[in-house]
Amino acid sequence: MAFGLGFILGPGIGGALAGVTIDGRTGAVPCIVAAALSLVNFGWAWFGLKESLPVERRSTSKRRLSRSTSPRRERRSRAPASRAPCS
């Protein structure tokens, strides 16, 4: 429901805020308000939501972002396929 209301009310609110003048310029207020709402939402999610995975089910090992063997390395190590000459 909130997502739909954002689509319905958001352009109107943004249009109304676009008319606010700051130092002789207009159009910055909707961006500032959107950024502030995003920060509030992030803060609510960070502090307001609890971890759903119980402590006993969490992994104790450190995770890596990449694996030691990547497909790129394997592709580079292969010899290039022979090509037939163009005629």
Image (tube, rainbow, N blue to C red):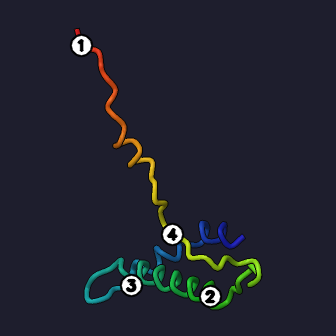
Q: Residue at x 39, y 41 (%)?
A: 75
In the picture of the structure, the residue carrying the numbered disc 4 is: 64
In the picture of the structure, the residue carrying the numbered disc 1 is: 86
- Which quarter of the rendered picture does the N terminus lie within? bottom right
Is 32 in front, or is 51? 51
Marks 3 and 1: which is nearer the front? 1
Counting from the top left corner in percent of width and height, residue 7 is at 59, 66
Earlier-in-chain disc, 1 versus 2: 2
In the picture of the structure, the residue carrying the numbered disc 2 is: 44
- Mark 1 and mark 2: span between their CA atoms? 63 Å
Q: Residue at x 55, y 72 (%)?
A: 63
Q: Is residue 50 above or below residue 61?
A: below
Earlier-in-chain disc, 3 versus 1: 3
Tag 2: amino acid: Trp
- Mark 3 and mark 4: span between their CA atoms? 48 Å
Counting from the top left corner in percent of width and height, residue 73 is at 38, 49
How many numbered circles does the render carry?
4
Q: Is residue 35 above or below residue 7?
A: below
In the picture of the structure, the residue carrying the numbered disc 3 is: 20
Q: Left of 6 or right of it: where is 30?
A: left
Marks 1 and 2: which is nearer the front? 1
Marks 3 and 2: which is nearer the front? 2
- Which quarter of the rendered picture does the C terminus lie within? top left
Secondary structure type for disc 1: loop
